[in-house]
Amino acid sequence: MFPTGRSGMTKITVGDWRTDKSGPMQVVSGPMGRERVHYEAPAAGRLKREMKQFVASFNKNDGTDLVLKAGVAHVWFVTIHPFDDGNGRIARAIADMMLRGRTRAHSASTAIRQERKAYYELLETTEKGDLEITPWLEWFLDCLNRAFDGAETILGTVLRKARFWEQRADIAFNDRQCKIVDLLLNGFEGKLTSSKWAKLAKCSQDTALRDIGDLVRKRVLAKEAAGGRSTSYSLVAPPQPERAGGR
């Protein structure tokens, strides 16, 4: 993660445990001069012993639900904070590794990054307290549930797009048409007009009108009810396959 041996402007120890040469390891945020200390990690002299216990627990099959174990492993690793930098990224990767094959398609790392503010607040509360981690685990589980919901939305979009292009495999599209149709499939906001087409495809108005007219004739696009200068277009829903066994 740190091929130059630096994190930003700071020289760090890479590929080895952190040291206390420059003072205690502190997790901070905020601009220079107004930093906020979220947490002070254990002394460097404890790292080998703490990490040995962590790895043994991670590899032990004690029957604990892997989702709970992932949440415990994450907060345990960032509490030890064994490296100069990259601990959060490694902790998120550890949680994803623990969950592999256990849950539906998702990324715990992505979900946690998206809720970074709440994540840091929970870590700070947990690590500055008495290490009661129930509130952290509740947040972690809720975060995973939101990740599942997000994954289902993404997968739904991917499947819908794949079905759309499969059902129109015999239709020729130029590069501009592919780009704009893909935007529509991704949930284009607002109405698609020839002016927007020209701007998005970086082409002239005449070219935009020819592209749109071609797709209207091929029944990929349909003109919406409003006409005149406000003429807009939308995707034509693909035909639904007939069900076998119907009357």
Image (spheres, helix red, strand yellow):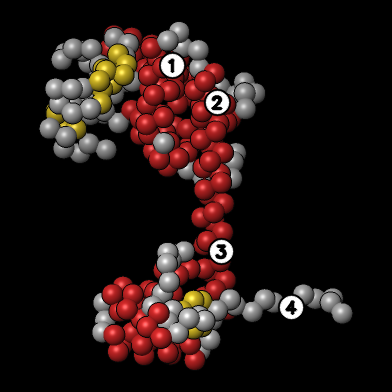
Gap in angstroms between the C-alphas marked 3 and 2: 32 Å
Amino acid beneath label 3: Leu
Identify the residue at the far right of this view.
247
In the picture, the disc for residue 159 is: 3
Mark sitting earlier along the chain (3/1):
1
Compared to residue 188, the image places residue 50 above or below, namely: above
Which residue is at 55% across, 25% downward?
138
Element assignment for label 4: loop
Mark sitting earlier along the chain (4/2):
2
- Residue 54 spot, x, y in % from top left: 45, 18
Gap in angstroms between the C-alphas marked 1 and 4: 56 Å
Which residue is under mark 2?
138
- The crowd level at tag 4 (other Cα within 10 Å; few <14, some 14-19, many 20+) is few
Gap in angstroms between the C-alphas marked 3 and 1: 40 Å
Which residue is under mark 4?
242
- Residue 146 spot, x, y in % from top left: 53, 41
Element assignment for label 1: helix
The answer to whether 6 appears left or right of 101 in the picture is: left
Name the quadrant containing residue 20.
top left
Element assignment for label 2: helix
Q: Would you say residue 174 is visible in this rendering? A: no
Between residues 97 and 10, which one lies in front from this camera angle?
Answer: 10
Name the quadrant containing residue 247.
bottom right
Amino acid beneath label 4: Glu
In the picture, the disc for residue 126 is: 1
- Residue 197 spot, x, y in % from top left: 34, 77
Which residue is at 20% across, 39% downward?
3
The answer to whether 168 appears left or right of 242 in the picture is: left
For the residues labelled 3 and 1, say whether their Cβ atoms are less than 8 Å apart.
no
Compared to residue 40, the image places residue 198 above or below, namely: below
